Amino acid sequence: MLLGIRIKNYSLFLDDRAGALLEDYLSGGVNNGAAMSAGLPAIIPMSSLNAVIGRNQSGKSTFFDCLSFISDAVSKGCVEASVIRGRSGFSRLISQGADSMSFELLFFMSNGHNPALPDEFYVSYSFSLRPDGNGKPSFISENVRYTTRPEHKDSYKTVLSVENGTGRVYFSDIAMEASLSDSRHSALRTYGNILQCPVLNALLDEMTKWFFCRFSVSKAENGMKQKVAPGAHKHLNSDGSNMKNVLDYLSKENPKQYRRLMDRLSEKIPKVGRVMDKLPDDFRSSPNRLFLYLLLLHDPVPRPLICIETPDLELYHDMVDVLSAEFRDYSIRNPYSQIIFSTHNPYILEAMAPNEVWIFKRSDEEEPDSVDIRCAGADPVVSEMYEQGVGMGAMWYSGHFDD
């Protein structure tokens, strides 16, 4: 689960952060009750369920694309990541006038039944990219540290440290020289595929399984529908076009589980029960799109992170209620997994707590193109109003978050 991220020089994000980072835990500033009592903002880590709100052009979509870019850069290489999924090259991604781009992320993870790892642990991952004379990026630094006690500086152990292609990496507690011949690809991908590097292996698995959902994106914006290979598929693809293949896989591999799933979905969407044996060809429109979300949320192998832009788009209010309840259920069933979604609908925020709402705002001061990100729960007034029974949606509708 992603607890925090810092973004430097990615498009609108000149030096912005959401959530809590390693330095915040070390300084004792995370969830600091004394600061809140004194009326000062507290540092809030990201939760298992997060709503991103803000006016149009406030950076919400860019934030999701940034997360997607990070995952692609780690798994596919930074050059390829710069030109896929509608991106127009690294020179268009890096902030104007900047000579490098960097990211810092903090994760809270479980060992996934790997005895070489603690039951629960924290991992800090940072990396920097720099373009050459032709605008092609390369990794110039990477650092991975982990601990079970984030508040204690001496408890952190560095398991990967690479600068300009050379450095050190730990194989089963033994430090060895790290040397990379291709700076377009991450050291994390190189050493994360080695089982003798359990922390790196777990981190790579986490970041490469992030899911960026595009069920709500219009066909014109989404471009051509993904080509769907014939046969049964284990998981939904990003636009949901392989839904029938996934249902076919579930019905053949585990008929009982398939029946339980369809019964549950039929309860939530009565129409499913009437078309279960002959699902419509186009299942992307409302309310059928809700079926895709529920199918994703009930995948037997949950994703560590699901990012969804405006999942409530064009859904009737009772369906929004179903969707928000399923989001909450997913976060409870999968405590190490996470959902981040954006919305313009105050109704869906009524089921959220202050620490789960993130407000994006374009800055008008100093840097006109920068973004300000803050957690609603860091505002003592918001927290007090919530404790008094005022819902987050009501606060948003009243304009409280627009100040």
Image (cartoon, helix red, strand yellow):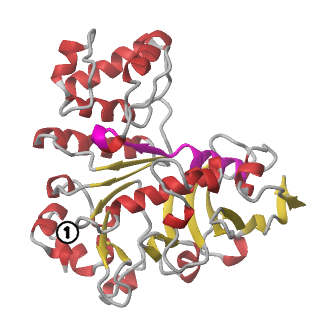
x and y, in percent, of residue 195 in the image: 78, 43
* Residue span colored magenta: 200-220
Res 156 quadrant in image: bottom right
Q: Tag count in the figure?
A: 1
In which quadrant will I find the C terminus?
Answer: bottom left
Residue 122 lies, with reference to residue 291, above or below; the image says below
Q: Amino acid at mark 1?
A: Tyr
Residue 156 lies, with reference to residue 252, above or below; the image says below
Q: Is residue 144 visible?
A: no
Mark 1, secondary structure of its residue: helix
Residue at 48% from the left image edge and 81% from the top image edge: 29
x and y, in percent, of residue 129 in the image: 64, 67
Residue at 30% from the left image edge and 19% from the top image edge: 262
x and y, in percent, of residue 110 in the image: 59, 49
Viewer-proximal residue among 288 and 367: 367
Res 142 quadrant in image: bottom right
x and y, in percent, of residue 8 in the image: 53, 74
Res 51 quadrant in image: bottom left
Relative horizontal placement of residue 280, taking residue 9 as reference (left or right): left
Q: Label 1, on which residue?
A: 386
Viewer-proximal residue among 228 and 347: 228
Is residue 205 in the magenta section?
yes
Within-10-Å neighbours for mark 1: few <14, some 14–19, many 20+: some
